[in-house]
Image (cartoon, coloured by chain):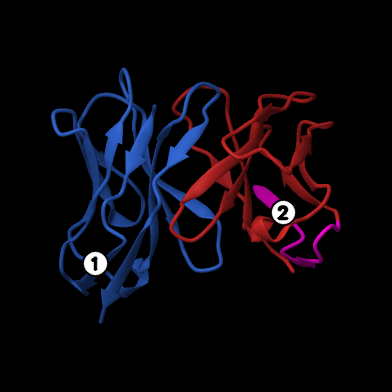
Amino acid sequence: AQSVAQPEDQVNVAEGNPLTVKCTYSVSGNPYLFWYVQYPNRGLQFLLKYITGDNLVKGSYGFEAEFNKSQTSFHLKKPSALVSDSALYFCAAPLGGNNRLAFGKGNQVVVIP
Amino acid sequence: NAGVTQTPKFRVLKTGQSMTLLCAQDMNHEYMYWYRQDPGMGLRLIHYSVGEGTTAKGEVPDGYNVSRLKKQNFLLGLESAAPSQTSVYFCASSYVTGGNEQYFGPGTRLTVT
């Protein structure tokens, strides 16, 4: 079955330090992979996606993600975290046809001032 | 351009009551989705639609019904609410082509007592 896994429940990082949020996938064929962010009491916002091509994908708010086929991973990164990056982050991959998505359980990121 | 909107924002129901959640999008998207979000479980797909007049079951369809009479609207109904349906409900929409990101509404927080 198509799925994604986010192995950590919460990531704590000091402001200004690099931020990494981990995601591994189990998807047949060439995967489409997505990252979304959810701020408190808001809907999900699209950050970036991998379709094909360059393994390093750049997205909104200074985030980037690296697609690694051999490790079946798609980790989200930001070189220097801000307090405003504190939010819930979701990795997602196609569930099947019709653009349906399977979401990971989410990672709470806490950036400490 | 409002994007995806949801009404109501909050609702409290008693067990056995019914209600309808309304989702509207103004982006001319073909595909629309209903998810529920529960702590530690990510988002789970309830039902989805690939066009006006069509609906299909997702991962957790039991206890819910949907209708898509107009392209821009997608309704989620609970005929007889149960406490297990206490959750935050999100609507999303997307273009048809695979790999297109989904756009999310702000959510409806439903409590069933």
Q: Which chain is blue?
A: A
Describe residue A109's horizontal placement relative to residue B32 as left or right: left
Q: Residue at x 82, y 32 (%)?
A: B70
Q: Which chain is red?
A: B
Q: Chain of mark 2?
A: B
Q: Which residue is mark 2?
A: B6
Residue B2 visible in the picture: no
Q: Is residue A5 above or below residue B97?
A: below
Q: Which residue is mark 1?
A: A81
Describe residue B103's horizontal placement relative to residue B14 as left or right: left
Picture quadrant of residue A50: top left
Q: Check disc 1: other Cα within 10 Å, few if <14, some if 14-19, many if 20+.
A: many
SS category of the residue bearing label 1: loop
The kind of residue tagged 2 is: Gln
Residue A73 visible in the picture: yes
- Does the magenta segment cover residue B8? yes
Q: Is residue A61 above or below residue B73?
A: below
- Please state the extent of the stretch shown in magenta in the rendering: B1-17
Describe residue B62's horizontal placement relative to residue B77 as left or right: left
Quadrant housing the C terminus of chain B: bottom right
